[in-house]
Image: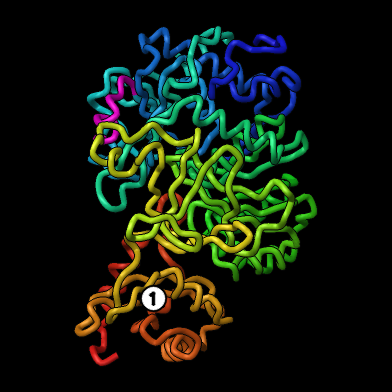
Amino acid sequence: MNDRHEHEGEGQLGWFFWRARAAYPHKTAVIDVSQGYERRITFAALDAAMNRVANLLVSAGLKPGDRMGLGMSNRWEFFAAMFGAMRAGVVPVPMNIKQAPDVLAYILADAGAKAALIEPAVNARLAEAAKDVPIKLALGDSPAGWSDFWAATSAQPSEFQPLNITGDDPAFHPYTSGSTGRPKGMTLTHGNTTWLIEIRQKHWPARLDQRGLIAAPLYHKNAMTIAFKPKLRAGGSIVLMGGFDARAYLQALADYGVTEAGGVPTMFSLMLQQRDLIEALDFSKLEILRLGSAPAHGELMDELARVFGVPTAQGYGLTETAGGCLSPPLDGRPVPRASVGSIMPGTEVKLVGPNGGERDDIGEFWIRSPANTPGYHNLPEVTAERFVDGWLRTGDILSKDADGFFYFEGRVDDMFNCGGENVYPKEVENLLLKHPAVAQAVVLPQAHPTKGECPVAAVVLHDETVSEADLKAYTLQNGPAYAHPRRILIKDNLPLTGVNKVDLKAVGLELAELKIDGAA
């Protein structure tokens, strides 16, 4: 490792924590409890593992710009593989390991992957999906025709000379979830991602004594953006779990003295249901809870702040912007409840109305930023539609208050018309969540005999004595009549996707079975 003041890998994402490695080689960087026991990885060991991965990929014949599919569970080896590949200029394609084989195969083919690194134990279909990839590496039990990744990596040198990679070169190649069709791939450059890391460290620096906790899937931007990159960049540490379980997550927060935890709102809703364990544990090291990747309702944030005694913050970001675009204001003003922040330094944003004109109050959120992806892979029409003169049209509806704080209101394509009135599902969800008995709420449109479409809802309750009729009466008394849910399905829990968001498709199938009264 080169410990000079300047480093040949400066500005390359694969070397983002080189200063911390140089200053604190023997300090613990990652505490991995994903396999049911504890593994502690120092900065020096993590750095050496990344170098070995880089050497392996170069020796296998991969060149800078080549894509490598990455299908692994939450374990520290994921970090070694992903950032080690970047050191060699190889572009990792992190995959949702829970997706169907045809989707995984499509992603690998669309990306033009020259190699694949998989963990068959977490999904045997990964090998099937990657059968046509030339270079095959597997962690754990290797299928026939696959090389043992860890054995091959361990035999490589622990030093690697940084390559001449520029900020415009591709760093990694993520895919969107594809909930409305085929997943869309995009390239994020070294310049996109390192710019965002440096901006955050400059204005909201992480500290040496901070520790994050990751339970969200590593293939999802939430885990990398909130915990891994900022903490290790500053010499802090992270605790890595194999997945999310509310009680295990709470136990890890206390046992490891976690200072900052982040995740999707559903995770925190499930945690709040474990009051017995919360009361028994010590969270005195905890400083803040960060929510992102899905809208967080103000009631949830208030309850988290009350129960844990720490501030809560809601973030907003997209895969297309390397995970970030709004932030707390630089003047130190507190971010209002349920706001997703103000304009991040170095970015431009605007709200655009349906007629294409710029507005001050509410509209589609457009952003122009050094963190923006150059565009979608193999989708020139979509790129031309979503990018206008460098502006990314996010498809999200945000509002802005008089103090410059933004609030997420929904998706452009979420809005539906009920009897001539525009309805945003999030507005109805917020109304339901104000009822003291409602813990979680999801609102979707349903076909209506006379209104065209109408709201229907699925909820999880704190109080089982509350009925569907009670909730309908509450929404009629406290909100516009046209927006009240015509049916409300009461459930013990809401189904989740692989990234711990509510599975709207599964909920929608259940709600579609409900009968709607045409007179309502």
Rendered position, 435 above or below 40:
below
Quarter of the figure with the N terminus: top right
Asked whether, in this view, residue 75 is left or right of residue 365, the answer is right
Q: Residue furthest right?
A: 284
The quarter holding residue 32 reads top right
Name the residue: 46% across, 44% down. Answer: 367
Q: Residue 510 at what x, y percent from top left? A: 30, 71
User: On the image, numbered disc 1 is attached to which residue?
Assistant: 457
First to last magenta residue range = 105-115
Quarter of the figure with the C terminus: bottom left
Name the residue: 69% across, 50% down. Answer: 253
The reply to whether the magenta stretch includes residue 344 is: no
Q: Nearer the viewer, residue 51 or 423?
A: 423
Q: Residue furthest front?
A: 357
Q: Amino acid at mark 1?
A: Ala
Asked whether, in this view, residue 457 is left or right of residue 518, the answer is right
Q: Residue 456 at what x, y percent from top left? A: 35, 77
Q: Nearer the viewer, residue 351 or 74?
A: 351
Q: Nearer the viewer, residue 122 or 282?
A: 282
The quarter holding residue 43 reads top right
**Colouring convention used in this rendered image of the protein:** rainbow
Is residue 308 in view from this perspective?
Answer: yes
Q: Residue 416 at what x, y percent from top left? A: 31, 70
Rendered position, 220 above or below 150:
below
Asked whether, in this view, residue 282 is left or right of residue 264, the answer is right
Is residue 242 in view from this perspective?
Answer: no
Q: Residue 170 at what x, y percent from top left? A: 42, 23
Rendered position, 364 above or below 190:
below
Under circle 1, the secondary element is strand
Q: Main secondary structure of the magenta part?
A: helix
Name the residue: 74% across, 66% down. Answer: 279
